[in-house]
Image: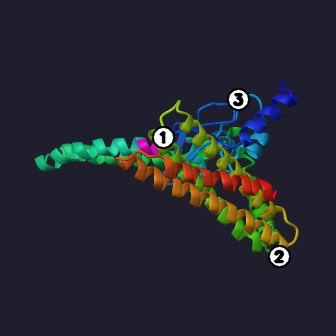
Amino acid sequence: MVNENSKTIEINRLKAPLKYKDSKVFDSKGNQLDCIETFSDLKYIVEPKDGILTEEEILEHAPNSKEAAKIRLSRGVGDNSDVMLINDSVPTLLGFYYTIAVCLSVPVFYSGNTSWMFFILILFILPLIYLYYIFNLKNYVATSHKAAVNDNHSKIKKTRKLEDVESEKGLSSLNRYVDEVEELKSVFDSKEIKVRDLIAKRFEPPQMTYDRFMTTIDKSHDLFYHEADGALNIAKYAVEDTPRVEGEIESKIDTLKSIIDQIEDLTNELVINISSDEKSSDDVKILIDDIDNLIDSVKEYK
């Protein structure tokens, strides 16, 4: 029997910000995360541990995980994005497969051998059959849920219609802020990974300069996500669209943009510094000081 304390610890782990170090990504407990690659996305996902959370709790607290995708598919409410998530190795395997197939096909077509050409054609078709199979959502539905699939679909459609109506009635005017913050989060994540790589190349650990710079990046990460979460909470849960509400959100978004701009300036300076014959780190230190000052100014304002 899983106690409530174990569940609380696991939920906190799933919700905690990711940590970046030496071009690697870790959860809050220091567990390294694998990169998940689909046809259209590249991300790191914290997976729930087995035997701690119920299916409903996984769907609530780790909706973007592979386990949540499997649950949705088994219940008949999943979609193609869930299929791609649990089959994240497919793009890489298809790339290798078709590279080999193309290499084999070139001499075959030059030889003009009909039998071998037919064999090559089959090789090209086989992955398509496999893709058709894995994207057939009915294959994932558990037997216990098959009878309820149609009912689930109708309930989901009704729920989505109600949500759309509520959104139209409520604060749809704030939805643009949600989209903007999510986009800024994606931009920040990519720039943070890059700047950490460059710091590691320019100041190899265990130099004190490396530790200081990485500490500043950690603080900027924490501040960025604190402000991003704050902006999202206001945009999603405000009961009234007022100038004060919009002002608070826009203030937080301005902070997010300032952090991204300074990380970008630091990245450019590191690139120049690494490529230069003169390995002075003075300009880099000035930019790090600017980031520290921004962090301090936001904290003082609060």
| Image disc number at residue 102 | none
Number of marks in the rendered image:
3
Q: Which residues are magenta?
A: 87-92
Are the residues tagged 1 and 3 within 8 Å (C-beta)? no
Q: Dot 2 lies on which element?
A: helix
Query: Counting other residues with Cα less than 10 Å from the Cα at mark 1, is it few (<14), some (14-19), or many (20 or more)?
Result: some
> Of callouts 2 and 1, which one flags the residue occurring earlier in the amino acid sequence?
1
Q: Position of residue 225 (x, y in %)?
A: 70, 51
The amino acid type of the residue labelled 2 equals Pro
Are the residues tagged 2 and 1 within 8 Å (C-beta)? no
Query: Marks 3 and 2, how far apart in space?
Result: 46 Å
Asked whether, in this view, residue 96 is left or right of residue 269, the answer is left
Q: Which one is in front, 210 or 96?
A: 210
> Of callouts 1 and 3, which one flags the residue occurring earlier in the amino acid sequence?
3
Q: Can you tell which of label 3 and label 2 is closer to the viewer?
A: 2
The amino acid type of the residue labelled 3 equals Asp
Q: Position of residue 241 (x, y in %)?
A: 83, 73
Figure check: 293 above or below 126: below
Please give the residue where the numbered disc 3 appears in the rendered image. 50
- Residue appearing at x 20%, y 43% in the figure: 116
- Residue appearing at x 47%, y 34% in the figure: 204
Q: Dot 1 lies on which element?
A: loop
Q: Which one is in front, 32 or 225?
A: 225
Q: Can you tell which of label 2 and label 1 is closer to the viewer?
A: 2
| Image disc number at residue 243 | 2
Location of the C terminus by quadrant is bottom right
> Of callouts 3 and 2, which one flags the residue occurring earlier in the amino acid sequence?
3
| Image disc number at residue 89 | 1
